[in-house]
């Protein structure tokens, strides 16, 4: 069965649907060994669809189930977590932007591409993972990159994480996990047991000792990219 390298981990996944197989293809690796199995069965897919409150196609159900399995394994044993955000790399450093739905993550990262041009590479516009690898935190792309499918297979050391909020002007400043805990928790997959909840909270505490957490009130204007970038610089 195929092994895919996601978040620097070789993971066994045996796709059921052709759409999921195609989505995973750029992450295929030649390893025969793997850390864990994230495959799902047709029965799991059918059960997911049956429980869904809205109509759901089989490949979308498989995508959700596989990503959930990977996210839970990464939190449980690999110093990382799922982090719903739009992420990019600029000059070799990673920047992540999380916000409540409809606030404009993708609009803001588009402004970074407009302002900084070819210096920007989109990592993942919707569903990256964060992992601590060799005492450094990285944003890691996954095959699931949002409706526009913007991103690529890469990892990048994290420079800053932004909590986006709509504003009348562009204002950015350092904040704390305690002040932003609601949005940080909404950006991740909540653990299914107490042990992993402790791991998640500990991970966030450690992450923001190493990485800047910035509250960003922004307008749709391209200058929001400059204001955000300057707030992250030493």
Image (cartoon, rainbow, N blue to C red):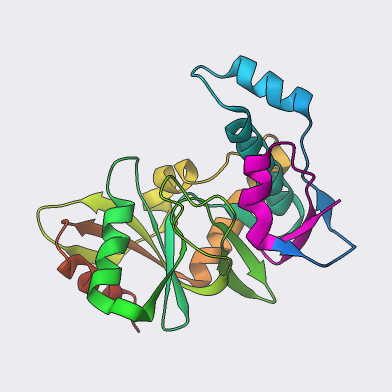
Could you tell whether 230 is left or right of 11 in the image? left
Q: Position of residue 14 (x, y in %)?
A: 80, 44
> Image check: 77 left or right of 157?
right
Give the magenta range: 1-27
- Residue furthest right in the image: 32
Q: Is residue 162 within the magenta segment?
A: no
The image shows a total of numbered marks equal to 0
Q: Residue at x 50, y 52 (%)?
A: 145
Answer with the quarter of the image where residue 139 lies: bottom right
Q: Is residue 103 visible?
A: yes
Q: Position of residue 157 (x, y in %)?
A: 54, 75
Residue ranking furthest to the left? 168
User: What residue is at 89 percent from the left and 62 percent from the top?
Assistant: 33
Q: Which residue is found at the position 79% from the left and 31% from the top?
A: 41
Q: Quadrant of residue 232?
A: bottom left
Residue 129 rendering spot, x and y as whole percentages:
58, 57
Query: In this picture, is 134 found above or below 95?
Result: below
User: As drawn, is 22 to the left or to the right of 127?
Assistant: right
The quadrant of the rendering that contains the C terminus is: bottom left
Hey, which quadrant is residue 171 in on the image? Answer: bottom left
> In this rendering, does residue 230 appear at all?
no
Percent x, y for residue 6?
A: 68, 60
Q: Nearer the viewer, residue 232 or 23?
A: 23
Q: Is residue 25 magenta?
A: yes
User: Considering depth in this image, is 219 or 56 the residue closer to the camera?
Assistant: 56
89 displayed left or right of 166: right
């Amino acid at each position: 069965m195929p092994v895919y390298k996601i978040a620097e981990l070789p993971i066994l996944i045996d796709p059921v649907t052709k759409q999921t197989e195609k989505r995973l293809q750029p992450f295929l690796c030649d390893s025969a060994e793997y850390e864990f199995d994230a495959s799902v069965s047709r029965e799991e897919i059918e059960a997911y669809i049956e429980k869904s409150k809205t109509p759901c196609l089989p490949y979308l159900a498989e995508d959700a189930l596989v990503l959930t399995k990977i996210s839970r394994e990464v939190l449980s044993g690999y110093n990382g977590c799922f982090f719903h955000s739009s992420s990019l790399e600029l000059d070799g450093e990673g920047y992540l932007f999380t916000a409540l739905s409809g606030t404009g993550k993708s609009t803001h990262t588009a402004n970074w591409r407009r302002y900084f041009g070819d210096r920007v590479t989109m990592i993942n516009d919707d569903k990256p993972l964060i992992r601590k690898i060799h005492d450094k935190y990285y944003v890691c792309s996954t095959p699931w990159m949002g409706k526009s499918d913007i991103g690529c297979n890469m990892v990048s050391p994290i420079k800053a994480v932004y909590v986006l909020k709509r504003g009348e002007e562009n204002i950015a400043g350092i904040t704390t996990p305690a002040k932003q805990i609601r949005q940080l928790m909404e950006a991740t997959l909540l653990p299914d047991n107490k042990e992993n909840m402790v791991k998640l909270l500990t991970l966030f505490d450690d992450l923001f000792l190493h990485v800047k957490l910035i509250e960003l009130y922004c307008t749709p204007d391209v200058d929001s990219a400059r204001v955000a970038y300057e707030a992250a610089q030493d």
